[in-house]
Image (tube, grey):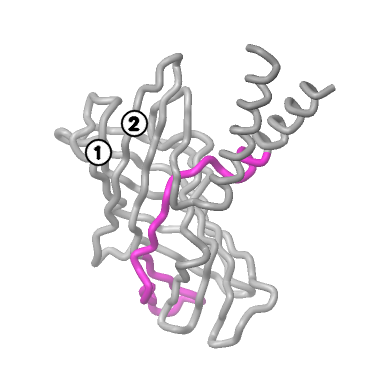
Amino acid sequence: MATGSCRQAVVCLVAAVGFACSSPAVGGMIVTDPSLPPVGGTYEGDPLSQIADYAGVFKATEIRMTDFQNVGRQISGNDEVLTFDVTLTALVIEASGVPQSPPLPVSFTGPLTAVFYDKAGQTLGTYQAEITSANCTGTIGPFAGTIRENPALDSLGETTITDLGGGNYQIDSFFDIFTELSVGGGAFLADANGPHHMVLIPEPATLALLAAAAVGLLGGKRR
């Protein structure tokens, strides 16, 4: 590739990485393995427009679902059912009616089950999906907490897998997740602002590394 073309490609990569970091609503990621859940992926809500409000007692923003591990796959009729461990992170901005400044970072871990309808035996295509259960435990300050998918509501989504050629695939995915929170063994409180719209992006650490590599390559071409 000519130097000018290479520089232009790197600039585009830097811009794309920056755009993905600042605008999770765009979503999507490129992978070499089209299996779900995508390795190195994160589902992220828009922190500017979405605040989880658990009965006015706890409020949280910058909610992410990441670190997919221990993946189990099974076929149920025409559907593909995945069960795997996830980590949910967020910033608590209000606790028991008291604003938290700075916000309190929290992390919950546990199993999640998702169904991808009519995906059995398929790789490419667009599939309706649903998170049928999630139950993650952690702490909020000194208190033990549990966040789960609201069993009374449907947390629906959609996933599209596209073959880009050259061994690369594009995965676009989102879920609208209804959640409930229990703190200190208390009753589960539903998110009054649910569902929380979560869009798939590369995990932030991966984006940062891509941006750094792109900037370094651009710098090298200038020398």
Which amino acid is tagged 1?
A: Tyr
Q: In this rendered view, identify the residue nearer to me: 37 or 147.
A: 37
Marks 2 and 1, the one that precedes in the sequence: 1
Where is the N terminus found, in terms of image quarters? top right
The residue at 53%/59% (across/down) is 108
213 lies left or right of 58: right
Look at the picture and state if 73 lies above or below 203.
Answer: above
Residue extending farthest to the bottom is: 97
Residue extending farthest to the right is: 223
Look at the picture and state if 5 lies above or below 100.
Answer: above
- Could you say where residue 190 lies in the image, as x and y percent from the top left? 36, 74
Which amino acid is tagged 2?
A: Ile
Residues at circles 2 and 1 in contact by the CB criterion of under 8 Å: yes
The residue at 65%/32% (across/down) is 11
- Could you say where residue 219 lies in the image, as x and y percent from the top left? 79, 28
> Distance of mark 2 from mark 1, alpha carbons?
9 Å
Provide the residue span drawn in magenta: 179-208
Residue 33 painted magenta: no
- The dot on residue 161 is 2
Q: In this rendered view, identify the residue nearer to me: 33 or 76.
A: 33
- The dot on residue 127 is 1
193 lies left or right of 212: left
Residue extending farthest to the top is: 1
- Could you say where residue 203 lies in the image, as x and y percent from the top left? 56, 43
Q: Is mark 1 on a helix, strand or loop?
A: strand
